[in-house]
Amino acid sequence: MPASDGPVLTFGDQRYAIQDLPDTAKAAIQNLQWADAQIRHHEEALRVSTYARQAMVQELTTILATVPALP
């Protein structure tokens, strides 16, 4: 039976001792962790951009309130 003293990967409904996985599986895990970090980074950048856009829309709304619209 494989050792389970170290970190464990739960994938689907199975558990695996990471130390017993082949190097290709360990590399895949690292790649997935990197991809997850990139997704979190881009989600945060999107939230910041969305907030900035909302602020610019509000600013433009305030400015245009003082400008007469075309007939």
Image: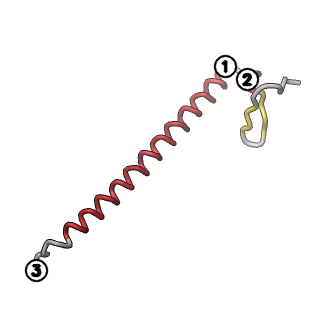
Q: Quadrant of residue 24?
A: top right
Residue 37 drawn at (x, y percent): 53, 36
Categorize mark 2 by other alpha carbons within 10 Å: few (<14), some (14-19), many (20+): few
Give the residue number, with chain letter if any, for mark 2: 21
Q: Is residue 65 above or below residue 14?
A: below
- Looking at the rendered structure, the kind of residue marked 3 is Pro
User: Residue furthest toward the bottom?
Assistant: 71
Q: Earlier in the sequence, mark 2 or mark 3?
A: 2
Q: CA distance from mark 1 to mark 2?
A: 6 Å
Q: Residue at x 34, y 54 (%)?
A: 52
Residue farthest along the right direction in this orientation: 1
Check disc 1 and give the amino acid type. Answer: Asp
Q: Residues within 10 Å of mark 1 (few under 14, many from 20)?
A: few
- Against 18, is 58 above or below? below
Disc on res. 71: 3
Q: Secondary structure at mark 3?
A: loop
Q: Is residue 41 left or right of residue 71?
A: right
Quarter residue 6 falls in = top right
Mark closer to the observer (3, 1):
3
Considering the numbered disc 2 on the image, is that residue within a helix, a strand or a loop? Answer: loop
Q: Which residue is at the far top?
A: 23
Residue ID at (38%, 55%): 51
CB-based contact (under 8 Å), mark 3 and mark 1:
no
Q: Position of residue 45 (x, y in %)?
A: 42, 45
Residue 23 numbered tag: 1
The image's colour scheme reads: secondary structure
Spatial distance from mark 2 to mark 3, Cα to Cα? 72 Å
Q: Image quarter for residue 20? A: top right
Which percent across, then down, holds residue 47?
A: 43, 51
Mark 3 to mark 1 CA distance (whole Å): 70 Å
* In-image side of 24 versus 10 (left or right): left
